Image: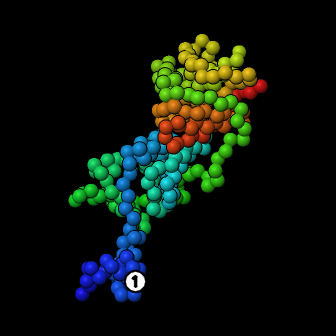
């Protein structure tokens, strides 16, 4: 019979292995059964990432990354949780809905091919996807080839631009540098008489027109530091949450 006080003392002293090898093995086995709860912030990020790609490959650690099927949007974030293992989710919205069946779901990763989502007496079993069927970001870190234009975009400006694009039903968002100012315009660039809405976000000595598709601005509400490369790539870094988006420009963009 194992004495509880003796067990506790030997655990602290580091002599548990010698006296209770079976208990040692049991404790080691428990360590291999990591459990995790996802914070509201992480759930918000995952909901946003699901608009970029319906699938995601979770990697061990505290980073989340996803890339669109067309590979023109890449997002990465640092979260407070420590993901215990690599696993794939084919339908991220379905996974989030499965979590919503519980108020404070706990995920158990002791099994190889699935996770058990539980709370009190309720349990769900969610099976992982084959990583080979998921379009996932490259392992290497993404960097902009050049940093030609930089400005800050606050949450009020971003909200108005996206709302105006929806109101006017226009497909394009252009960052325009002319006459010493940087403006962002939502419009239909193929139609000179289309309705448009613009905000001024900075000053410049260059002349340029960087075009995006509104449908590619799949970023969380908030304020951003924006950097644009004339090599047709941009980064949007949220100033309040540790999340960054890399968004490709349209080929007809110009920079002088």
In which quarter of the view is residue 249 placed? top right
In the rendered image, residue 132, in percent from the top left (x then y), is placed at: 54, 58
The residue located at (37%, 82%) in the rendering is 16
Residue 129 in view here: no
Residue 208 in view here: yes
In the rendered image, residue 78, in percent from the top left (x then y), is placed at: 51, 49
Question: Which colour style is shown?
Answer: rainbow
Please tell me how many numbered marks the rendered image carries.
1
Pick the front one: 149 or 190: 149
Q: Is residue 215 depicted above or below 77 in this figure?
A: above
| SS at badge 1 | loop
Outermost residue on the right side: it is: 256
Image quarter of the N terminus: bottom left
The residue located at (60%, 12%) in the rendering is 193
In the rendered image, residue 207, in percent from the top left (x then y), is placed at: 73, 22
Q: Is residue 237 depicted above or below 191 in this figure?
A: below
Residue 34 is left or right of residue 178, and the answer is: left
Disc 1 crowd, CA 10 A, few/some/many (<14, 14-19, 20+): few
The residue located at (77%, 25%) in the rendering is 256
In the rendered image, residue 135, in percent from the top left (x then y), is placed at: 55, 51
In which quarter of the view is residue 217 placed? top right
Pick the front one: 240 or 41: 240
Pick the front one: 12 or 140: 12
Residue 82 is left or right of residue 74, and the answer is: left
Which residue is under mark 1? 15
The residue located at (31%, 80%) in the rendering is 7
In which quarter of the view is residue 73 placed? top right
């Amino acid at each position: 019979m194992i004495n509880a006080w003796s067990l506790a003392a030997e655990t602290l002293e580091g002599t548990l292995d010698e006296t209770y090898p079976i208990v040692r093995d049991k404790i080691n086995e428990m360590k291999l059964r990591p459990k995790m709860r996802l914070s509201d912030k992480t759930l918000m990020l995952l909901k946003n990432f699901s608009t970029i790609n319906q699938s995601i490959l979770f990697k061990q650690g505290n980073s989340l990354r996803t890339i669109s099927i067309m590979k023109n949007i890449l997002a990465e974030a640092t979260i407070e949780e420590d993901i215990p293992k690599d696993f794939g989710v084919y339908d991220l919205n379905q996974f989030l809905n499965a979590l919503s069946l519980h108020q404070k779901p706990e995920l158990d990763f002791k099994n190889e091919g699935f996770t058990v989502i539980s709370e009190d007496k309720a349990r769900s079993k969610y099976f992982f996807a084959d990583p080979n069927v998921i379009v996932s970001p490259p392992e290497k870190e993404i960097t902009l080839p050049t940093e030609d234009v930089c400005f800050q975009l606050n949450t009020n400006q971003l909200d108005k631009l996206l709302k105006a694009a929806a109101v006017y039903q226009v497909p394009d968002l252009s960052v325009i540098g002319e006459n010493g100012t940087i403006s962002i315009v939502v419009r239909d660039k193929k139609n000179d008489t289309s309705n448009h809405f613009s905000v001024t976000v900075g000053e410049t000595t260059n002349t340029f027109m960087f075009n995006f598709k509104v449908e590619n601005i799949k970023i969380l509400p908030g304020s951003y530091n924006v950097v644009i490369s004339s090599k047709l790539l941009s980064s949007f870094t949220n100033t309040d949450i540790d999340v960054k988006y890399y968004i490709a420009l349209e080929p007809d963009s110009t920079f002088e």
